[in-house]
Amino acid sequence: MIIHKKILVLFLSGLLPLCMLTGCWDQRLIKESRLILVAGLDVLPNNKIEDTVIYPVVNKTSGSSGEVKSVMASSYGVTTRDARFRLDKKVSQNFDPSKNRVFLFGEKLARQDMYASLDVIYRDPKGAVNAMVAVVKGTAKDALSIKSEDSPLLSVYYPQLLRSSSEIGLFKITTVQSICASMFDPGIDFVMPYIKPNMKTKDRTNVIGTALFHKTKMTGTLNEKESLMLMLLNKEKAHYSRFTFKITNKQKVKEEDYVTITVNKLKRDWSIKIDKNNHITVPITLSINAAVNELPSDHLNSHQRAIKIEKKVSKEMTQLAKKTLSNLQQANADILGVGKHIRAFQNDKWIKLNWDKDYKKITFEPKVKVTITQHGIIN
Amino acid sequence: MRLKKDDSITSAQFTFFLLQTQIGVGILSMPYNIHLIAKSDSWASVIVAGCVIQLYLFLFYRLTVKYPTLSLFDLVEKLFGRYIGRFVIFLYIVFFLLMAASILSMFSQVICLWILPLTPRWLLIIIMGGIGAYAVRGPIKNLARFFVFVSVLLIFFIVLVVYGFFEADYLNVLPMGKEGFMPIVKGSEKAMYSMLGFEVYLIVAPFVKAKPYEKLKAATISNVSVTALYTFLTFMCIVFFGIKEFDLVPQPILYMIKSFSFEVLERIDLVFLSFWIVSVATTYMGYLLAAARGMLALAKTPRKEHTPFVKLALIPTLFIATIPHGVYEAATMLNEISRLSLIFVFLIPTLLVIRSFMGKKKGDTSHDHT
């Protein structure tokens, strides 16, 4: 009996390491794969999808430290996955897209259907749903073929570019995951950063505003100022949301016509009113505490002068808000989630609405009140 | 049936025993399954389910008051008579084995899908089965201690999901009761399936060294905790995904956690899954123990230990677990077998309670000799 037990224990302890080594089937070694860090998708004239990827390659020189280089490769196919398959065929080692940081979409593709090209990422358990997204004016391939001087690696350059732009209040960082819920929700839409590579010098990419989406398609754009305003209307305050407005028209030196303010504090009051004829009115009031950053023409010695500036800036900001909102409506992009609010709080009315059409008909009544609370360290 | 004196657990251990058996494989897909029916009111379904289970705990309590030393199997045999009783015990064993097998099967599917796509499923099943059988061997006391110990991991479930608050949109749960009352009730059926496991109350209760009232208290604490945890998880999923995206994610909690990323850590879903594996293991152990105890009751051996029967219980679960191919079949199997719980967890204990009262009217004194 005792000997039997000993044999059994030996046998089991032999089995144990076998069980422990199950990882062998599923190990993925970095040295055996090409880590994709930036990917771009375009649609070609023949309706095929072009997939462009950037991956780092370490050049082992004779010295001690290797030099890391960004390498670009691209291929096309009928779907995103198919294009990637063709890409795998021509590049040594296989691609690993799980650590991707940025997805760029050519404008033409964005205007068709975003979900179709993102599906593969959502479906893969290793999919990089945290990757940032942006729309490129032109093609994504162009944006990926620049040689940036700010950083030798595009996989560093693009994340930094998008992050720093979000800090100055142009947009909130959007990731593959963060847009997913809005893509399917009929009551809210989303935006993405809108960038444009400088094709003459091929050294940098500019953020030129935001791309507006309705459901899964890109339907319009906002310029920088409108993007800033959209953020405020959406109750998102970045660290440095700055606006420059023309307040006079008569100074000799052109620079003196302008004032620049930074938003310090933001309060948004809004309500959604639906009257008997189902006409929707949305008054939005933004109360902003601002700091004057630049005012070459005048000095804020007295409070009266400050109030004068406040009035002018408030008027300009209200105009800007109106324009921003009308652009949103033209693009049929309900970024503020008005539909969602109606659904949540006035559900009986929501059922009767056809939001695809009715969103364009609603009346926004924006009003911006700016109060200057700081003026830097000189008057 | 007389119990061995040294194998008893405290009422606190009993709480964790039930808690660990209740929280299990269903935690990942439960919010999704409820959502399919109750939409944005899914969280209310969970509360309804918790209330129904609490009612049954009261019923179980009635039984333990009347027969404090009898387990489910003893009760069945006593109240239904020898032949019917033994047949019902046999059915119970089959039910517990099927539950254990479907848990194993679902476990291996999820692991294959999320972490180890290339590892053969049978290996995962064998490893989990082996661990389960190893833990169930020996006195119940040991198992209960293990359950208490691993309960620390439940805190991580909450901590990891709380992060979702930062990306939540509360408008998604409004308006409440949009779909009406019926979907909430129907959804609670699905919620109940994920909260199964409380039926081991009737099997483990005789081992608890406490008054019946304290046992009920222990079970109530467990049930309230599970209901609260599940309500919280379901609520988080709704506010995170909204109503439309939710339709696309059958394992919403994992998907939500996957999208979080911290400075140093990525793929936190893998961390979550490793805690979840422990929860699955404890649920599996609970059912394996139930099946082994059932076999013991049926076998009528002089030694009142379930250890020899664990192997007997383990092998069928391993084989049944490998039957379903693909996620659809595994999910269907788990769902259909959970449906059997309506009979075994809800119907038969009700009959037992009714029968026990009828016995009283007749002046049955048979329980006096225990």
Image (spheres, helix red, strand yellow):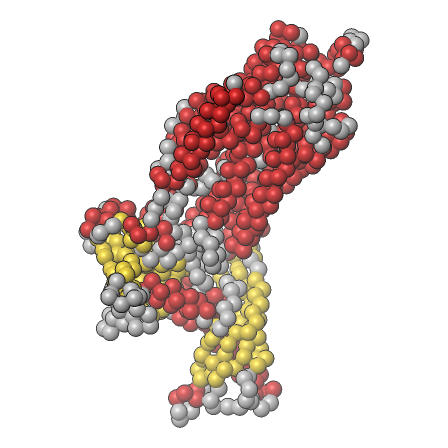
Frontmost residue, A57 versus B65? A57
Residue at horizontal 31 percent and vertical 66 percent from the top: A65
Place of residue B253 in the rendered image (x, y in percent of width and height, measured from the top left): 50, 43
Q: Quadrant of residue B362?
A: top right
Place of residue A250 in the rendered image (x, y in percent of width and height, measured from the top left): 42, 90
> In the shown orientation, is residue B18 left or right of residue A25?
right
Q: How many marks?
A: 0
Q: Looking at the rendering, in which quadrant would you find the N terminus of chain B?
A: top right
Frontmost residue, B29 versus A225? B29
Place of residue B322 in the rendered image (x, y in percent of width and height, measured from the top left): 41, 25
Residue A258 visible in the shown view: yes
Place of residue A98 in the rendered image (x, y in percent of width and height, measured from the top left): 36, 51
Q: Quadrant of residue B345?
A: top right
Q: Is residue A58 above or below residue A32?
A: below
> In the shown orientation, is residue B123 left or right of residue B193?
left
Q: Residue furthest toward the top?
A: B83
Residue at horizontal 51 percent and vertical 52 percent from the top: A340
Q: Is residue B118 above or below residue A210?
A: above
Residue B175 visible in the shown view: no
Residue at horizontal 27 percent and vertical 56 percent from the top: A53
Frontmost residue, B258 versus A325? B258
Q: Is residue A176 above or below residue B370?
A: below
Q: Residue furthest toward the front?
A: A3
Q: Looking at the rendering, in which quadrant would you find the C terminus of chain B?
A: top right
